[in-house]
Image: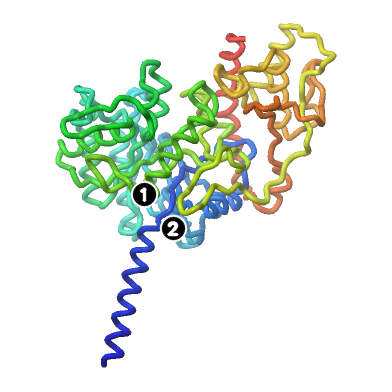
Amino acid sequence: MGLQHFTACVLLALCILSQGLAKGANGFACNWGTRLTHPLTPQITVKLMKDNGFKQVKLFEADPAALKALGNSGIQVMVGIPNDLLATLASNVDAAIAWVNQNVSSYISKNGVDIRYVAVGNEAFLKTYNGRFVNSTFPAIQNIQAALIKAGLGRQVKVTTPLNADVYQSDSGLPSGGNFRPDIQDQMISIIKFLSQNGGPLTFNIYPFLSLDADPHFPKEFAFFDGSAAPVVDGSITYTNVFDANYDTLITALEKNGFSQMPVIIGEVGWPTDGTANANIKNAQRFNQGLIDRIVKRQGSPKRPSPPDIYLFGFIDEDAKSIEPGPFERHWGVFNFDGSIKYPLNLGGGKQLVGAKGVRYLPKQWCVMSTQANVDPNALAESMSKACTYADCTSLSPGSSCSGLDTRGNASYAFNMYFQTMNQQKDACNFNGLSVITNINPSPPQSSCKFEIMIDLGKHEKKSTPSSVAPERKLHSMVMLVSSFIFTVMFLLCV
């Protein structure tokens, strides 16, 4: 009897210990965007997440290849529903049932994907949308919840909706003055109440970078966790960084409306490395290291010491993403497009970031402006317009990593990006006699400006890419085409 009692105690202790270890080893969370012309295979991307301790991931849409790669990976998944589906899902519960069956139930049962959340919409109440999705978001949430219950997943998979921090405000300018915007107050209360009743969290995106980049008078040091800016004093609380101040403004808004215990997820937070003066390696490393340190220490905010789950934005650069918010949109990744490390990060416990393995590249050749070519302004403008309409030239933006190049350097960068984007096809380095292919890397020495060599899609995808990915990539290319055309017009006006 004594031995049985001792054994039971040991087993109980081990059980408690294992639960404690599991809770303390949640790891990191990230956003996996798939708007790339030359993506890593989903298998390499998932392996990269696991190698770096990422245990949770948010997808902006139900990407089939990504979801299949996440099957039996041990990574918990939040799968998103794009805003353009909200109206359909809001008006037709059968459409919601079909979406859940196709994009949640099937991947859980057939592929072993650990889907924990469905994110309905993405920043649907953003002011710049002018109310376009305000009336469809809540009904869509209700119908997706009903569909999950019908599928027997109501307990396993929770509904949420990622919202931008502009849904709340403070008339006093202090966190204690926080409340929801008057124009969406009723919708917010309805959504929060419904999510609370069904065990779903609220998800918010907070971007100190955008606060800094949008306001030339914003105190730069206040954007960072280790900054030396003058603190903001709010009663008995002192704030030393804008993240905590922003987050506690939200917590105050929840408290004022009777939801002091509402669980919150930070769905996006990060810092880009290119596209504008404030988006650079130094600032990104500084911000993200501070963020990682908080996650490792499980540090919360002054008003809510218990830390939320935080999804780092983003995991990898996306060269085909829309640049409507700014050229920096393609450079949020902690990793470059090919999974290589942009800058070191200490992940705690002596661990450092590690790059992707098994990546294969196109041949080491670049398309540059010929030294024999005459600089005809009209011909050059036409050629650069062509190149930057179909390829990513955002690193040439004012203040960006390649903004210091001369005229020939600008042209060479644009020509090469087009050449690489077109998989180094023979006719892709033909710009009215202005260009030539070289085997000498034209990247400026001792500079962050890099002339890329793209991933060899042919070597990676012959066996691993489902046929369903092809039409999706065409859609990504259309988005890139429109965004790049807008960028090209803006860039040429500045040249």
Measured from the top left, where is residue 205 in percent x and y? 36, 36
Measured from the top left, where is residue 438 in percent x and y? 82, 28
Residue 419: quarter of image:
top right
Residue shown at the point (81%, 18%) measured from the top left: 370
Residue 22 - label: none
Residue shown at the point (41%, 48%) measured from the top left: 78
Measured from the top left, where is residue 56 in percent x and y? 44, 51
Q: Amino acid at mark 1?
A: Lys
Q: Amino acid at mark 2?
A: Asp
Q: Is residue 306 visible?
A: yes
Specify few, some or many for label 1: CA neighbours under 10 Å numbering under 14, 14-19, or 20 or more: few
Judged from the image, the secondary structure of the residue bearing numbered disc 1 is helix
Marks 2 and 1, the one that precedes in the sequence: 2
* Left or right: residue 299 compared with residue 323: left
* Left or right: residue 367 compared with residue 469: right
Observer-nearest of 133 and 360: 360
Judged from the image, the secondary structure of the residue bearing numbered disc 2 is strand
